[in-house]
Image: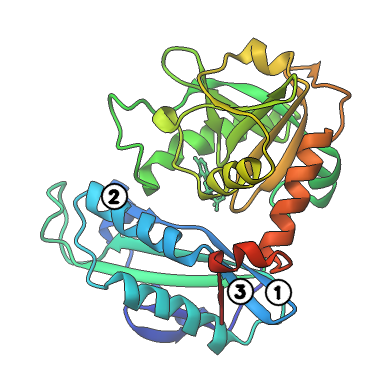
Amino acid sequence: MEKAKFIWMDGEFVDWDEAKVHVLTHTLHYGNGVFEGTRAYKTNRGLAIFRLKEHTKRLLNSAKIVAIKTPFSQEELEKAQIELLRKNGFDSNVYIRPLIYLGYGVMGLYHANAPVNVAIAAWKWGAYLGEEGLKNGIKVKTSSFTRNSVKSTMTKAKAVANYLNSQMAKYEAVIAGYEEALLLDDEGFVAEGSGECIFIVRDGILITPPNDNSLESITQDTILQIAKEKNIPVERRRITRDEVYIADEAFFTGTAAEVTPIKEVDGRVIGDGKRGEMTRELQEAYFDIVYGRNSAYEHMLTYI
Ligand code: PPE
């Protein structure tokens, strides 16, 4: 990972190498923390953060769900992210990672007396699943891990602890020679990737599962808005793994993954085994928006 100059910690800008925590940091032991992932793109008018409001809102909602009281407001956190990018003087695309965590001073499971800390880092992060993956698609494996169940975890929260499951699924997929995992829900329906939502295309219809068993993905929402504008028929319904096998096209969406085509699932070739036509159209539209080339979506960008 490429270092930047500063990391924002509890209202201060700290040198990258000095942005440290105590080993008895509560979150490190018990896993209660929440985070975001937001991208800023280099547009013709300078860096612009994509959907800053929505990401910051989801961060605060995540904290509320896991009973963490955030000592900063939406406005303060938005401003901190903008300031962070300015102060670091980035000249290319960056990924922003805000984290709300329980700090040092209290041990034991009862967390309500632990101090709450907030950190925001940003660094250059290229194509999450590779440039080649963005262009030609990736190979996906249905995971042996069930996606975190709504019966046992708080799945509307982008909570640190939820990512143990994602991490295990990702590891399993990668060591087996695939690039990403596809997790099913506890009833066996397709839920999401380890860090992405999924879309399939069948007979010209764009299909994505409801967010009952996936994060409320901001990228997924952007794609749905684009589809609406382009009059592409959309269905939000449950899908099965075999329906993915016989789809004409499939792709993942996520802030990090952007719009990544899926070319193969469990050894079954999807469609023609390359980026499909609708996937290409939506991917291009997405990049036009994040890079500020579509004025109809300017409201999604915060120029810094
Ligand atoms: N599902 C999960 C489980 C998830 O982690 C993400 C984002 C999404 C769906 C897509 O959400 P959105 O970014 O709002 O479209 N995953 C983040 C973490 C990636 C990482 O490895 O770290 C991300 O894309 O930033």
Q: What amino acid type should be assigned to the residue bearing mark 2?
A: Asn
Identify the residue shown where x is 24% and y is 47%: 65
Q: In which quarter of the image is residue 164?
A: top left
Q: Nearer the viewer, residue 81 or 223?
A: 223
Q: Where is residue 259 in the image (x, y as percent from the top left)?
A: 69, 45
Identify the residue shown where x is 62% and y is 15%: 241
Q: Badge 1 is on which residue?
A: 42
Q: Badge 2 is on which residue?
A: 32
Q: Where is residue 190 in the image (x, y as percent from the top left)?
A: 54, 21
Q: What amino acid type should be assigned to the residue bearing mark 1?
A: Lys
Residue 83 left/right relative to 295? left
On the question of residue 21 being in view, the answer is no
Identify the residue shown where x is 12% and y is 56%: 112
Identify the residue shown where x is 44% and y is 71%: 120
Q: Which mark is residue 48?
A: 3
For label 3, the SS is strand
For label 1, the SS is strand
On the question of residue 77 being in view, the answer is yes
